[in-house]
Image (tube, rainbow, N blue to C red):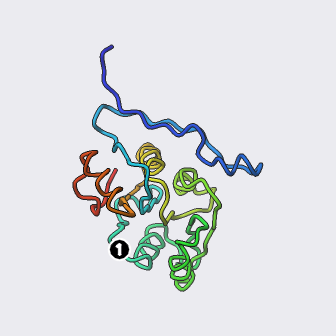
């Protein structure tokens, strides 16, 4: 009694998944001791997630090509056998081209990057790496899931204008360009 907690909730991660009658939508909740979760502003975040084999090895500061090579080595795979999940968005076109140029395979998803991050922790899914930008609040939930699963997640906020930058400052996030770790 009397404990303070941080709670992150996404009552429906993948609303368009449900609207189109496809699979993969989740209701997600993350709970931690007070002060342990980022109070993420509603904006985009660069994201990278991997399962336990590559945990602690990847970085948003690495190039896409370097991260793919690191995951391949950690999982004892050829680069051509690495599967990278990316949200299918126009903003990811250059990323998609760079991943393809490495020879790695791509799984484009319409929505649901929390589930996509989680999938990197389970060999049977065939997914090795999540890359791209998506909602920051979903990034917090994905990070908690990856911590629980022994994987890794990194994020970096992407404020689009001065108003979003100010909102971050008002929320106590002084350096929006820093990598946010588990």
Q: Nearer the viewer, residue 108 or 58?
A: 108
- Please give the name of the residue rendered at 59% of the width and 53% of the height, measured from the top-left corner: 112
The image position of residue 167, as x and y in percent, is 32, 50
Left-right relation of 178 to 119: left
- Please give the name of the residue rendered at 32% of the width and 31% of the height, measured from the top-left corner: 33
101, above or below 137, in the image: below
The part of the image, by quadrant, that contains residue 165 is bottom left
Q: Nearer the viewer, residue 37 or 137?
A: 137
Left-right relation of 182 to 97: left
Q: Quadrant of the N terminus?
A: top left
The image position of residue 78, as x and y in percent, is 54, 78
Left-right relation of 109 to 91: right
Given the current orientation, which residue lies at the most extreme front position?
Answer: 163
- Please give the name of the residue rendered at 52% of the width and 55% of the height, measured from the top-left corner: 117
167, above or below 77, in the image: above
User: Neighbour class for label 1 at 10 Å: few (<14), some, many (≥20)?
Assistant: few
Given the current orientation, which residue lies at the most extreme top position?
Answer: 1
Left-right relation of 125 to 137: right
25, above or below 31, in the image: below
Which residue lies under the disc numbered 1? 62
- Please give the name of the residue rendered at 45% of the width and 59% of the height, measured from the top-left corner: 49
Given the current orientation, which residue lies at the most extreme bottom position?
Answer: 101
The part of the image, by quadrant, that contains residue 52 is bottom left
Total marks drawn?
1
The image position of residue 105, as x and y in percent, is 61, 75
Instruction: Identify the element where label 1 is drawn.
Output: loop
């Amino acid at each position: 009694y009397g404990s303070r907690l941080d709670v992150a909730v996404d009552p429906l991660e993948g609303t368009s998944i449900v609207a189109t009658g496809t699979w993969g939508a989740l209701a997600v909740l993350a709970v931690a001791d007070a002060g342990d979760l980022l109070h993420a502003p509603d904006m985009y975040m660069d994201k990278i997630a991997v399962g336990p084999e590559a945990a602690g090895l990847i970085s948003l500061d690495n190039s896409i090509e370097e991260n793919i090579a690191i995951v391949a080595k950690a999982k004892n795979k050829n680069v051509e056998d690495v599967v990278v999940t990316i949200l299918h968005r126009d903003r990811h076109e250059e990323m998609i081209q760079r991943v393809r140029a490495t020879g790695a395979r791509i799984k484009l998803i319409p929505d649901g990057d929390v589930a996509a991050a989680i999938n990197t922790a389970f060999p049977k899914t065939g997914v090795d790496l999540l890359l791209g930008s998506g909602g920051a609040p979903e990034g917090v939930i994905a990070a908690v899931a990856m911590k629980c699963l022994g994987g890794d997640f990194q994020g970096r906020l992407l404020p689009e204008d001065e108003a979003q930058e100010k909102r971050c400052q008002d929320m106590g996030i002084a350096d929006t360009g820093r990598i946010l770790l588990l």
